[in-house]
Image: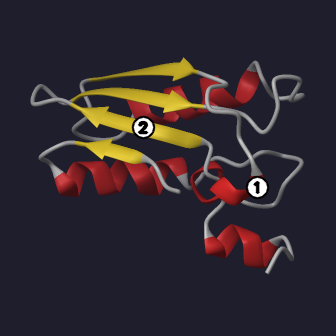
């Protein structure tokens, strides 16, 4: 599947993605980008970033900490004026949303 990316600044959005790849669900040895937990990145012309993210389940043990970690790390990316994360469970996350990298890492391929 893959995240929807809305921006004109491909260099800055790549730095955002690189930072997202440093965030891991502690129960799964794959970063949240490769897991497919990021649904949308919307970076406007004023460098204000809106992130739409999900979790592997609504009862995820890191439901409080993981979204906050992602949002806080993205606020520190050079060039980002602000970052606001919205947590959603629509559509429901499935393992089909993982990248091939994640599926290989977890033995699904």
Q: CA distance from mark 1 to mark 2?
A: 17 Å
Please name whichever residue, 2 or 17, is drawn nearer the observer in this view of the structure. 2
Image quarter of the C terminus:
bottom right
| Side (left or right) of 98 relative to 53 | right
| Side (left or right) of 71 relative to 104 | left
Find numbered disc 1 in the image and state the secondary structure of the residue it sits on: helix
Find numbered disc 2 in the image and state the secondary structure of the residue it sits on: strand
Splitting the image into 4 quarters, where does residue 102 fall?
bottom right
Please name whichever residue, 99 or 11, is drawn nearer the observer in this view of the structure. 99
Q: x, y (%) of residue 94?
A: 75, 47
Q: x, y (%) of residue 37?
A: 62, 43
Q: Is residue 83 above or below residue 27?
A: above
Could you tell me how many numbered marks the image carries?
Answer: 2
What coloring was used for the rendering? secondary structure
Mark in the foreground, 1 or 2: 1
Q: Which residue is mark 1?
A: 95
| Side (left or right) of 6 relative to 23 | left
| Side (left or right) of 70 relative to 44 | right
Which residue does the image show at 74% across and 24% down from the upper left?
65
Q: x, y (%) of residue 23?
A: 64, 47
**Tag 2: Cα neighbours inside 10 Å, few (<14), some, or many (≥20)?**
some
Which residue does the image show at 17% across and 29% down from the upper left?
44
Which residue does the image show at 86% across and 29% down from the upper left?
60
What label does residue 40 carry, if any?
2
Q: Is residue 65 above or below residue 106?
A: above
Q: x, y (%) of residue 6?
A: 25, 40
Which residue does the image show at 61% across and 60% down from the upper left?
34
């Amino acid at each position: 599947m893959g995240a929807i990316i809305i921006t004109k600044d491909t260099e800055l959005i790549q730095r955002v993605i690189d930072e997202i790849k440093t965030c891991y669900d502690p129960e799964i040895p794959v970063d949240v980008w490769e897991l497919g937990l990021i649904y949308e990145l919307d970076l406007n012309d004023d460098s204000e970033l809106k992130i739409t993210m999900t979790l592997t389940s609504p009862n995820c043990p890191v439901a409080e900490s993981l979204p906050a970690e992602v949002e806080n790390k993205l606020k520190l990316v050079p060039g980002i004026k602000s970052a606001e994360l919205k947590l959603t469970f629509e559509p429901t996350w499935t393992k089909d949303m993982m990248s091939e990298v994640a599926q290989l890492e977890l033995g699904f391929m």
